[in-house]
Image (spheres, rainbow, N blue to C red):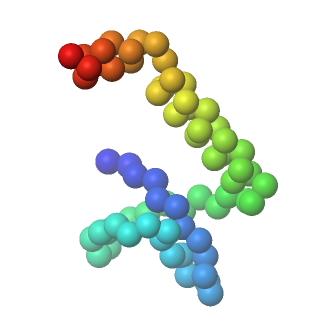
Amino acid sequence: MLKTLWATVCQGKIELLESTELPEGTRVLVTLLPDKEADFWLQASQASLDAVWDNTEDDVYAELLQA
């Protein structure tokens, strides 16, 4: 399973911004995001989430919860 974790570099070491249990020896892939591009990716992610959550097809589930 692929999982994305946000991190920062502090004194030359990568520090995760959220806690997670990674087994010793877990292989990771680090992608550097220049600050200028970070805002772009955050906005792009938000647009994708909005498209998934803000749609009329999910209204049927809200109706079922009210019953």
- Residue in front for this viewpoint, 1 or 44: 44
Q: Residue furthest left?
A: 67
Residue 57 placement, left or right of 25: right
Q: Nearer the viewer, residue 11 or 54?
A: 54
Residue in view at x 64 percent, y 38 percent: 44
- The structure residue drawn at horizontal position 47% and vertical position 59%, both measured from the top left corner, is 5
Where is residue 41 drawn, in percent x and y? 65, 45
The answer to which of 38 and 57 lies nearer the viewer is 57
Most extreme residue toward the right, as rendered?
Answer: 36
Query: Which quadrant: the C terminus?
Result: top left
Find residue 31 and report its image quarter.
bottom right
Which residue lies at the image location 52% right of the left edge and 34% below the top edge?
Answer: 49
Left or right: where 41 falls relative to 63: right
In this rendering, position of residue 37 left or right of residue 65: right
User: Where 10 falls versus 5 (above or below)?
Assistant: below
Query: Which residue occupies 33% across, 20% down?
Result: 62
